[in-house]
Every structure is written in C-alpha cells, then in structure tokens.
Amino acid sequence: MIRTLVLAGHELAGYTDKRLRRGLRWSVAESLFAAVPFGIVAWLLLDVLRGTGSVQRAGGAALVLLACLVVRIACARRAMPTIFSGAYAMMGQARLRVADHLRRLPLGWLAGRRSGSLAATLAADMQLVEDIWAHFLGVFFGGLLVPAFLSVLLLWLDWRLGLAVLATLPLAFGLLVVGQRVLIAQAGKLQAANAHGQAEVLDYVQGIAVVRAFEPAGEGGATFQRLATALAAMRRQALAIELWPTPLVALFGCAVESGFALAVWLGAQRLGSTLSGEMLLVFAVLSLPVYRQLFEVGLSFLLLRYAQEAMQRIRDLLAEPALPEPAEPQAPQGHAIELADVRFGYGGGEGEPVLHGISAHIPERSLTAVVGRSGSGKTTLLHLVARLWDVDAGAVRIGGVDVRAMGSELLHRQVAMAFQDVVLFSGTVRENLAIGRPGATHEEIVAAARLAEAHGFIERLPEGYDTPLGEGGARLSGGERQRISIARALLKDAPIVLLDEATASVDPSNAAQIQRALSTLVRDRTVVVIAHRLRSVVHADQILVLDGGRLVEQGRHAELLARGGVYATLWQCQQQTRQWQIGAAAP
Ligand SMILES: Nc1ncnc2c1ncn2[C@@H]1O[C@H](COP(=O)(O)OP(=O)(O)OP(=O)(O)O)[C@@H](O)[C@H]1O
C-alpha cells in the first residue's frame, strides 16, 4: 500500500522529489537513534540488576544516551524541512497537472459534474495526499523501526519470551484490516456527503441574489432546505466516521497489548528455572514501547487507507481521456473557416442532435453573422469552431485543416473568443485583459480596450487598469464585463475572432461604437459574431440563419429580407418590438 502511495505520488506529480527521499532517509536515521537507547537501557538494567554495574559504566551509558539524543534531534531538524519542501513541491506540481488536465478534457465531461464535487477532489483529496507525504511517511517508517529493533533485541535476549511478546500481533493486524474496511465504507460515504455539501454551498453562495429575491426569509425556501439537508448529511457522516471504527480501534489496542499479559504469564511459569527475575523485568520494560509504537503505527495505517482512496479519485480524474491530439499537428493555410456537413449533439452522440449537417464557407477577412431563434444552435456552432467540443460527424476546417488535426496549441493561436457568459477572474483589469497574451504592453492593452469601447470606464475605476475586479468581476456592470471580454478577445490578436452576443448587454451608443470597431477589425481578421439584435449585423459580409439546428438561409441582409423567409420574419419581429412600450396594449 505504501509502495502504491509513493509510486502514485510519482505518477501524480510526474516526478519524485529528491528532497522527499532524502528527508525520509533522515527520518529513518532519527528513528534509529530513537531505538538504540532502548538497547542501552536494557544493557544498563541487566548490568545493575545482576550487580555487575559500576559508576563508570553507568556514566558511559548516560553519555551515549545523550549523544543519541543530540544526533536524533539533529536528524529530525534535517528530516522535517526536507520532507516538507519535497512533499509540498510535489503536491504543487500535482495540483498544476490536474488543473492542466482539466482544461484538456471535453467540456461534456465537465458539464456532467458539479463544480463543488470537483472542487472537493481538487482541494480535500489533494490535501489528504499531501498530508500523507508531508507528515505521515516519516512517522510511519520511523514508527516501524523502533518496534522492529526492539523485537529483534527481545528475541535475541530470550526467543521464547520474545515470541510471546509478539504472539498476538497477527490477530491485532487482522482486526486492523477489518477496521480499515469499515473505515473505507464510511470514508466513501463521507466523501460523497462532503462533495455534495460543497456543491450545495457553492450553488447557494453563487445564487444568493436569486435566493434573496425569490425565497421566503427564514428556513422555508427550497434552496435553503436543500443546503440544510446536505449539511446535516455531512454532519451525520462526520460523526459516523469517528464512531464506527472506535470499538475496532479499542479491540486492536487490546489485541496488541494482550501479548504483554501472555509474556508475563509465560515468564512467571519459567521464573527461577530457565528465566531470571531481572530478565523478566527487562522484557516488561522493553515490550511496552513496542506496543505503544505499534498502536500508533496501526492508527496511521487506517489513515493511510483513507488517503489511498483520495489518491484513487485523483488518479481517476487524471485518467479521463483528454480531447485527442494529433501526432503531427498540421498548420492551417490561411484563415477561412469551412463547415462541412457538421453534425453534433450534446451527450457524445447519444443525446438529441443539436446541429443537423451544417455546411458553409466563411471567407478569410470577412464579417459573418450567425443569427436565429433562441436555442437554434448558434453558440454550439461557435464552440465547435473553437473545438471546445468535437463534432459527431462532418468537419470544421480552418485554412483547409480539420481543427482536430491542428492540435490545441496551434488552434489556440488561431482563435480568440468572447463568450456569451462572460467569465472574469479575481485579478486586476489588466490581468483579465492580458489572459490570452501574457506579455502584452500597456499600449497594446489600452489599444484593445479602446477598440472595445472599454477604455473610458476602465480609466474611471479607482486604480484604472490595476483595479482588482473582485471574484467573477463582481464590481462591473453587465455591459462593462462584456466589453472587457471583447477587449480580451481583441488583445489576443488571433486571426480568427468569435464573438458570442457581442453587443447583447451594451447600450445602443456603445453597441454602434463596437460595431465600428468590428468593421475595422475585419480588415485583417476573420470575424464571426452571434447577434440577437439584427440591426447590428446589417452590414455583415454574410449572414448565416440557423433554425432548429439547420442552416436555413445564407446571404447579405438585403438578399435575406427580399427572400421573405426566417430572417425576414425575425427582422419584422424586431422592428415591431422597437415600437413596443411597457404597459401599452399590443397593436
Ligand atoms: N451543455 C449543453 N448540454 C446539453 N444541451 C445543451 C448544452 N448547451 C446547449 N444545449 C442545447 O443545445 C441547443 C442549442 O443551444 P445553443 O446555446 O447553441 O443555442 P443558441 O442558438 O446559441 O441559443 P441562445 O440564442 O438562446 O443563446 C439548445 O436546445 C440547448 O438547450
């Protein structure tokens, strides 16, 4: 089990830190110098009890004991920092690897999991494994060394009595294995309850505004009740994991120490014949630390199993297949986008199809708008171009190369995207803008912000571009968040820019300015925008109209209007809605 944990440590972090090995060696040395004094004490006791002792011999023994203590402390001082720095470095690397792996997974895998449960694996499970490396391994190896040394000593002094001292250990460790099984069953339930609880807490905190707006105060609301139930389950499981193994731990302790009673009884039978009184006393003195240490080791052994389960969950996460990468990535020839009979459904081809064979050509350096009713598949189409998902059939090609054959690194350089749900991180405005281009200069950042009509409001923030945005960009309005997201996409300076609902929550004057910015952008980029406001795309080079996951119309604004189809209907609806007034009767 230990071997598995240490090897899995290598597997998680991708390397085994030399400091961990070195620290473990220091820890073993420390235990050795903790064990040797027991031998000296046994020798001293026998010496004194047999009447052969002298002041000089006792003084010499005391000096050796002192020397052992000094060396032991010196070893401990080397062991701890070395183990800690090795273990924390390895775990830091392991966390980065898991985080890196997460971003390579298909979004469908992530969509099927609650973020709270993933957070539990990333935080609590990682912490458990880290604790094992940092705190446990040294104690475990050291804890085994002292009883092993003492057992050899006892067997050497009197093998029959030595065997009696150790006789009940197999029974004790048998009980420990049963205890482990109980603990693991409970630990699995606790982990599930914790993961569920964390997910509920996350939902509750993220949706606190909705809870306040819709749920009755007090404990009557459904969301509050769901949270309370999850927290109660966590409490019950936490208690169960403390209580269930308790009788088994007590039994384990009994079984370990019952060897002592057996040895005393057997020794008493032989007293005066094959065993001297002083030898029995030495056995009594030396066997007690064996039991104490083994009891400690046994308890840590239980925890070890707990960590092994956590390790398995992390390994399972790492074993999830990432989006396949080509062996030899192909570079695109240009930046036109080709949709070739694209078919896709969420759920890996098992769910309802969302896109039913879409074929279109999006020329290089053009502005293409994708429009259609809500749920017609516009966002899905853009996500396929950026390969957030893989198509079920057909192909998405950029510059003549299938995005699956391009490899994520090359594709990442080709495409910048502003999402419909703007995600901002808790860093500064500058950090959020430069996320796709870490080395960007201040001038480049400002230029992108100006293009996206974001420079004005950023300048008015208390610390300008260095203003921290708070979690999720909480201090910005919807329109401001959107403009940051557009500026971020522009700053990345990729030849293809995908904008989802670019001007949805921007006021009309800003929308017009962003529109102009996009027209400038198109001079040297391929731009695809999803637009609900059709007025914003009347000048687009091409408009793709989706309906029910199918491409039903394609052309310029005037042509589509003249056709009198889906686009014309949508256009008329929007013209009418512009004349609506809240509270006025419908015409
Ligand atoms: N992650 C997902 N898992 C399962 N189904 C999804 C997922 N995302 C979208 N869908 C479904 O796919 C269909 C197309 O959704 P999509 O978001 O692409 O439409 P859209 O045209 O962009 O809509 P809107 O204009 O409202 O943003 C919808 O029926 C939606 O319910």
Image (cartoon, helix red, strand yellow):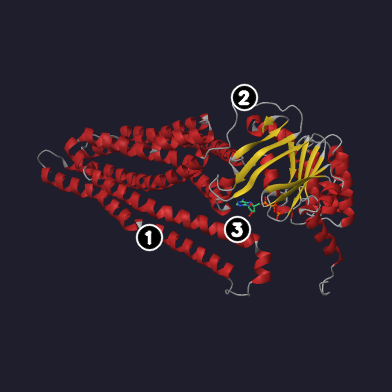
Instruction: Look at mark 1 in the image and give the residue it sits on.
Output: 243
* Upstream in sequence: badge 3 or badge 1: 3
Q: Nearer the viewer, residue 577 or 319?
A: 577
Instruction: Look at mark 3 in the image and give the residue it sits on.
Output: 202
- For disc 1, the neighbor class at 10 Å (few under 14, some 14 to 19, many from 20) is few
- For disc 3, the neighbor class at 10 Å (few under 14, some 14 to 19, many from 20) is some
* Residue 298 horizontal/vertical position (percent): 34, 46
| Residue at image location 31% in from the left, 35% down from the top | 149
| Residue at image location 15% in from the left, 44% down from the top | 267
Label 2 to label 1: alpha-carbon separation: 56 Å
Give the answer, above or below, for where 315 lies relative to 473. Answer: above
- Amino acid, disc 2: Glu
- For disc 2, the neighbor class at 10 Å (few under 14, some 14 to 19, many from 20) is few
Describe the element under mark 2 as helix, strand or loop: loop
Q: Is residue 204 left or right of residue 571?
A: left
Look at discs 3 and 1 and give the one toward the viewer: 3
Look at discs 3 and 2 and give the one toward the viewer: 2
Q: Nearer the viewer, residue 170 or 40?
A: 170
* Upstream in sequence: badge 2 or badge 1: 1
Q: Nearer the viewer, residue 450 or 227?
A: 450
Q: Are marks 2 and 1 in contact (CB under 8 Å)?
A: no
Give the answer, above or below, for where 428 lies relative to 242. Answer: above
- Amino acid, disc 1: Leu
Answer yes or no: disc 1 within 8 Å of ligand 1.
Answer: no
Residue 387 can be seen in this image: no
Instruction: Look at mark 2 in the image and give the residue it sits on.
Output: 328
Q: Is residue 315 left or right of residue 432?
A: left
Q: Are marks 3 and 1 in contact (CB under 8 Å)?
A: no
Quadrant of the drawing holding the N terminus: top left
- Amino acid, disc 3: Leu
Q: Nearer the viewer, residue 344 or 427?
A: 344
* Residue 22 horizontal/vertical position (percent): 49, 30
